[in-house]
């Protein structure tokens, strides 16, 4: 098994990058958002998964071990192969996928090309018990980084989740409530108040 490839980027295409390592060129299929960060001549270390099917062998690569782990989980969902998993990870980060699964947001997952509503729902059903909150955040709450315009807004939403869990709400309910708030809010108190209003009206 090839755990990672470390070398120089020799070529970049729409779907893959060729990484020169030890005199060999490895074609590595990667999510679009990972390919966009690469430049020819750049030294990189890509965490890889070797997919073997009949007479076909393909390498799939990711920037972090976390992305690779999420990819492994996705390809085990019935109806999603490596290309489908790449499509999902091409429009959302591993943490965004965790949030979508934990908050039952099938619409967010279905934004990936080739992924319909039923497939997105299947991802949620099959991964909900496998995506541990502790792997999404060292504080035990999901990390938020969805459709948010600024780093301040992301931090405010993360802090609001931490506050809600401290008040006794489950991390899943906290994530759902914060996900219902205005994504442009940058003040933790405003996000928290909006999330609490949602929780109170739901109850």
Image (spheres, grey):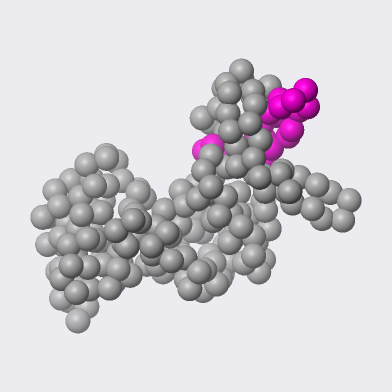
Residue at left offset 64%, top offset 65% = 76
From this viewpoint, is residue 95 visible?
yes
Question: For residue 6, what is the image quadrant?
Answer: top right
Q: Is residue 33 left or right of residue 191?
A: right
Question: For residue 197, what is the image quadrant?
Answer: bottom left
| Residue 187 against residue 174 in the figure, above or below | above
Residue at left offset 67%, top offset 48% = 49
Query: In this view of the protein, which residue sits in the foreground, 149 or 39?
Result: 39
From this viewpoint, is residue 12 visible?
no
Magenta run includes residue 19? yes
Magenta run includes residue 74? no
Query: In this view of the protein, which residue sits in the foreground, 76 or 44?
Result: 44
- Magenta residue span: 14-34
Looking at the image, the residue that sits furthest to the top is: 41
Query: In this view of the protein, which residue sits in the foreground, 22 or 115?
Result: 22
Image coordinates for residue 108, horizontal then vertical, percent: 44, 58
Image coordinates for residue 28, horizontal then vertical, percent: 69, 37
Q: Is residue 169 left or right of residue 18?
A: left
Image coordinates for residue 105, horizontal then vertical, percent: 41, 64
């Amino acid at each position: 098994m090839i755990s990672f490839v470390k070398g120089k980027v020799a070529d970049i295409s729409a779907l893959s990058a060729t990484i020169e390592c030890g005199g060999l060129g490895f074609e590595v299929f990667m999510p679009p958002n990972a390919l966009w960060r690469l430049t020819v001549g750049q030294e990189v270390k890509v965490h890889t998964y070797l997919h073997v099917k009949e007479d076909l062998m393909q390498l799939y690569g990711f920037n972090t071990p976390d992305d690779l782990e999420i990819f492994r989980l996705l390809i085990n969902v019935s109806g999603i192969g490596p290309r489908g998993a790449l499509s999902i990870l091409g429009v959302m980060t591993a943490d965004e996928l965790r949030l979508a699964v934990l908050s039952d947001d099938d619409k967010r997952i279905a934004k990936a090309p080739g992924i319909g509503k039923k497939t997105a729902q299947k991802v949620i059903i099959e991964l909900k018990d496998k995506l541990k909150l502790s792997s999404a955040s060292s504080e035990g709450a999901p990390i938020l980084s969805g459709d948010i315009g600024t780093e301040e807004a992301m931090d405010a939403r993360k802090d609001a989740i931490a506050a809600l869990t401290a008040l006794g709400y489950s991390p899943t309910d906290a994530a759902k409530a914060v996900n219902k708030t205005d994504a442009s809010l940058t003040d933790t108190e405003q996000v928290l108040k909006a999330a609490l209003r949602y929780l109170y009206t739901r109850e």
